[in-house]
Structures are given as C-alpha cells and as structure tokens.
Amino acid sequence: MADGPVASTVTATAPQEDFERIGAVADAVLYEGYLLYPYRRSSAKNRVRWQFGVLFPRDWVEADGPVTPTVSGSADSWYQRTECLLRTTRPDASVHVRLRFLQMRRKQVQETGPDGAHRDVPSLRTGDGTVHLTFDEAVPREAALTLRLDERAVQGTTVRVGAPGGTDTEPLPGDAGRVVRVREELRGTVTVTAERIAPDLVRLQVRTTHTGVALSPRTGRDEALRGAFIATHTLIGGDGVEFVSLIDPPAALHDEARACRNEFTFPVLGDDPPTARVVLSAPIILPDHPQVAPESPGDLHDAAEIDEILTLRTMLLTDEEKREARATDPRAAAILDRVDTMPPEVFARLHGAVRSLTPARPAAPPGERPAWWQEGGDDGLSPATDTVLVDGVCLGGGSRVRLRPRGRGADAQDMFLAGRTAEVAAVFHDVDGSVHLAVTLDDDPASELHTWYGRFHYFRPDELEPLEPAPSDTPAAEA
C-alpha cells in the first residue's frame, strides 16, 4: 500500500452544490460504455466493454513498452494527469478534488446440485420463470480530498484511494441456486500539487495512479479489468477560486494554458456559463460547459448513438431479446422499462431541437440584399462562385488556405486539423447571418470522393489563412 493518508469520503466541506450541478454529465461519463446496445450478454458489442478511463497496473500496461500519452482516455494506461489554471479571489482559497470511478464486480450464477453443492453455470431459470445470467457488473466509487492554496501547496498532498475487495452471496428462490458477486481490491493514489505562477494565478495538477499488484503480462484484458479503475474521471471545485478555460483561454493567459499538460484526460469547465467554479476532467473529449439535453429522458450508456435512434432500436428488440437484456443487468432492465412506457409526447421531443439560431431579422428594404439567406430566398447567392475577403485576399472556390481554427466555437475535430492545408470548395451563407467556407484537405486521399458526395469540413473566414489569391477577381460577397 502506498504511503500517505487515506482519502476521505465525500463530506460537506466539498462544494457539494457545484458538483451536483454537473452530476448528470459526470454520471454519463461514469457509465459511458458500461453496457452497449442491444444490451444483451450475447451481443458481440458487450464482450468488449469499458474502453474509457481504464487504469491498470503499470507493469501490465507497459509489458510491450511505455504507454503513449493522449488527450483522452480511450487508450489503457496506469495513470491520469490533469493540469488546469485557476485564479484565486481570496488569501484562504482552497480546492476540492473528487475522484470517481467504477469497480468491476464479477456476477457468477451457481446452480444447486442434488448433493446441495453449488456449481458455476452461465444461466439459470428459477421456478418463478426469472432468468439469471453470469455477467460482469460495476460498482460506482468516489474519494475526495482538499488542498489549501498556501505556501505549502507546491509540495502537494498524496492520498491513497481505491475500494475494498469482497464477496456477496444472494440466494435464489426455491433453493435453485445463488448469485455470487466478487470484487477485487483496488489500490491507487491521487497527488494534488499547486504552482503559483502569478499573485492570483495557480497551475493545479491532479495525478491519479494505479498502485495495485502487478499482473502477469500474459493476463488477458478481461481478467485484468477485475483489478482496474474504470471510467476514471475527476471533479475539481474550490472555495475562493475561478477556473480558466483551456479550450478558449483569455489572450493574456494563452501561453500559460498551452503549457498545461493533460494525459489520458481532458479538463473542461463543467458548470453553466458564464460561471467557472468546477472543472470536469474526463477521459472523453467534451466542450466547456457540457450539458445533457433536456429532452433526454435517461441514460442509454451507449453514447455513440443519439437518443431517438437508440430508443427506436431498443423498442424494436424482440420479446426474447428483451428477456435476455433484462436478465443481463438491472441497468438494461431500467432502459427497457423506460422505452416501453415512454409517453408519446416525451418520444416526440427526441426528434430534435434547434438552439443555435439567432432570432429572425427584419426583411431587407427593397433593392437591398438581405443579411441572411435561405434556399430560394436570394438568387444573387452562389456558393460555388461567391468569395469572401480574408486578410485582403478574396477566397472562393479553388483558393488554397491553411487551417487556423480558433478556440471559441471550434470543436475538437477542428483543432486536430490545425496547420493543415486545404482547398476551398464553396462559400456558404447561414440563416443566422454567418459565413462558412467548405474545404477539402490537401493530404486527404479521399478528398475527390468527398467532393463528389458534397462532404466538406467547414470553417469561418477568420479560421483560414490565405496561401494564394483566389483565381477570380469577383468582389467579396457580403457576410
């Protein structure tokens, strides 16, 4: 066991209300990939579970060489490192760190034999018709610690975290058998350090490390998961602090934000804008201020699908498939109960909502071009031939540019393309008055196919750096 104090359970000293405000998003992270559609044990998808934020013993992970750090936790590792910036607003400021993860629990169904002994079976039907399946479950765990941001903070605080092992036995009706649930002990540490880089500015580091017993390199991943921290993520709040966005930092803190190193996790501002009292550092790439859509009636665990599609697919499972899903896991049974009893008005809300459009503007006076456009509303617009002025250069179809996505409004996929060169295919005017340029990447081997299908990457004019003048002298179209 690592040296140092043991982490406390969550107490009233933590910013409980701040953490509760982002509870739905944090729970979605915790249970992402817990159980995948179609929610049956026999499904191939459910034989490869828990792909995010999984921490194993270091010797096992690095049996074939050191791990390569990434910005998200879709790769197995033995640690997570979060660094973020915060401003202190009073001398006695402190931060509260809450580590959350799942502990795997092996659910084994056992049948009672004629001699009264129990033997492992993959499934068992009891006298009341209920089917019980052998399957892996998981238990949510939390640990919390607090760090005062005084002169001692730079030395840091290390606490032990984890979860105890144990065995629970549940007898089945009619003495038909029993369900045995086994947990292996988890051991790890969390180290929190703070570096004051200005009188009111602190760089905070939270490092979570798996310190459990080493495994044989030949141990399979399914077995190794029994002693792993799963869906590991961190909530960071504080008293007398305000966090700085690393996605879109103030211009004065751009260099300090870029110097933050985050490995196997991605920290974002977690609470509602414009406040910045909580950071969610998750193994999944999220935007600042992530939210669960108010139309979503409940978690579906398989976040690769939108609610409407996944709900429809779940409704269409056969009765036999639903029986197996219910026997697979209680969370699967809860999903089936919800979709089977969903009122029509709730289901209708899943069809989608528009939240990003600005209010409609008044019609332009006669003879003037409108500031917004819709299909058929203005014959003067032509995406293929229109141009827009960028740094004194008219960009239009055929122009070559370098991609310079900005922090504000750019998603993670845009940021991955920073510095790449591309060719402009068209200029589009959105109904909210903005202008976007459709581009194809120069080094994309499928660019010709994407052009044929009309599939492009879209960037605002201020996110493009002209590489050469546009081939046309057509005046720039109004934005």
Image (cartoon, rainbow, N blue to C red):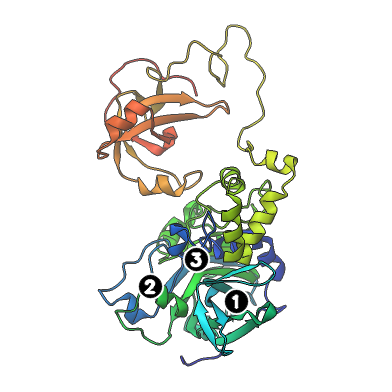
Q: Earlier in the sequence, mark 2 or mark 1?
A: 1
**Residue 240, percent across and down?**
65, 70
Residue closer to the observer: 198 or 373? 373
| Amino acid on which disc 1 is placed | Glu
Q: Nearer the viewer, mark 1 or mark 3?
A: 1
Q: Residue at x 38, y 19 (%)?
A: 384
What's the distance in space between the residues labelled 1 and 3, CA to CA?
Answer: 21 Å
- How far from the left and from the top, in percent, is residue 254? 44, 55
Q: Secondary structure at mark 2?
A: helix
Can see residue 196?
Answer: no
How far separated are the C-alphas under marks 2 and 3? Answer: 32 Å
Are the residues flagged by discs 2 and 1 in contact, CB closer than 8 Å?
A: no
Residue underneath mark 2: 221
* Residue plotted at (69% across, 65% down): 20
* Residue type, mark 3 in image: Cys
Q: Position of residue 341 (x, y in %)?
A: 73, 49
Q: Nearer the viewer, residue 192 or 474?
A: 192
| Pointer 2 or 3: first along the chain | 3
Q: Residue beneath label 1, please?
A: 142
